[in-house]
Amino acid sequence: STHIQIVPDSLALAGAGADWLAHRITRKPDLTILVATGQTPMGMYGHLAARVQAGTLDCSRVTAVQLDEYMGLEPDDPRSLRGWMERAFVFPLGIRNVVPLDDPATFTARLRDLGGLDVAVLGLGPNGHLGFNEPPSSPDAPTREVTLTPESLESNRGYWDGLAVPTQAITAGMDVILAAHETLLLVSGTHKQAILGAALDGPQTPDVPASFLRRTALTVLADREARP
Ligand code: GLP
């Protein structure tokens, strides 16, 4: 089932996203969460960190699972998505358990041992990708190494000034993402409007990997610019 919640702007998106996730962490303190980086969830993660600092939310038993990573980077490279996830989510929320995305076999085994994902928090790629499941990606696409499309390289270019975007990446598979018990898809801005329309209203197709989220227990949290 798909639940679509529209909020006025990105500020409201951050608060509503934090409410959604905090509610689930409170209900199940050892929640296993797939964690997107990118710009869209940063406000939400900031809200959650503020609640942890204020003592109204405890994330110490949560497990954070990495969604995607570039290949060939040194661990301390500023482009590392693990580093981004740690700085934006893991450390500020006081999370102690992390499943990094180092290699597909280890990641898949660790997730299996954990019993899979409770929750996936995702952004929407401008080409409909989830993590780095670039189009075309079918629902059973496993955790794997991928070559990024020119469109994704372009959209990721803004994350660090001057540094090239690595062309090779590793992504949690569509199989992993679609098996999460619940998914939160965060979408903000006019530049996401067309692809969100395709994902929600168009055919379910590997050409828009996010369209397969409609098979899951999906909450779409979008602002007016993304979903007028
Ligand atoms: C990026 C990342 C995703 C992210 C998505 C949206 O390429 N691989 O993890 O969710 O695209 O990014 P943003 O939120 O910055 O628009």
Image (cartoon, helix red, strand yellow):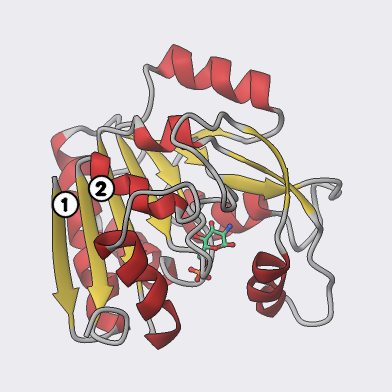
Spot occupied by residue 83 in the image (x, y as percentages of width and height): 66, 53
User: Which numbered dot is residue 211?
Assistant: none
User: Which numbered dot is residue 2?
Assistant: 1
Q: Which residue is mark 2?
A: 214
Left or right of residue 221: residue 206 = right
Left or right of residue 170: residue 166 = right
Please tell me which residue lies in front, 216 or 207.
207
Spot occupied by residue 132 in the image (x, y as percentages of width and height): 60, 50
Lower sequence index among marks 1 and 2: 1
Could you tell me if the residues under marks 1 and 2 are in contact, i.e. CB atoms within 8 Å?
yes
Which residue is at 53% across, 35% downward?
A: 173
Q: How many marks?
A: 2
Would the CB of label 1 be found within 8 Å of ligand 1?
A: no
Which residue is at 38% across, 73% downward?
A: 43
Which residue is at 41% across, 66% downward?
A: 41
Query: Is 151 placed above or below 98 here?
Result: below
Spot occupied by residue 36 in the image (x, y as percentages of width and height): 48, 54
Q: Residues within 10 Å of mark 1 (few under 14, many from 20)?
A: some
Query: Is 189 placed above or below 59 here?
Result: below
Residues at marks 1 and 2, CA–CA distance in whole angstroms: 6 Å
Secondary structure state at the residue bearing disc 1: strand
Q: Is residue 26 visible?
A: yes
Q: Is residue 61 visible?
A: no
Left or right of residue 125: residue 163 = right
Quadrant the N terminus occupies = top left
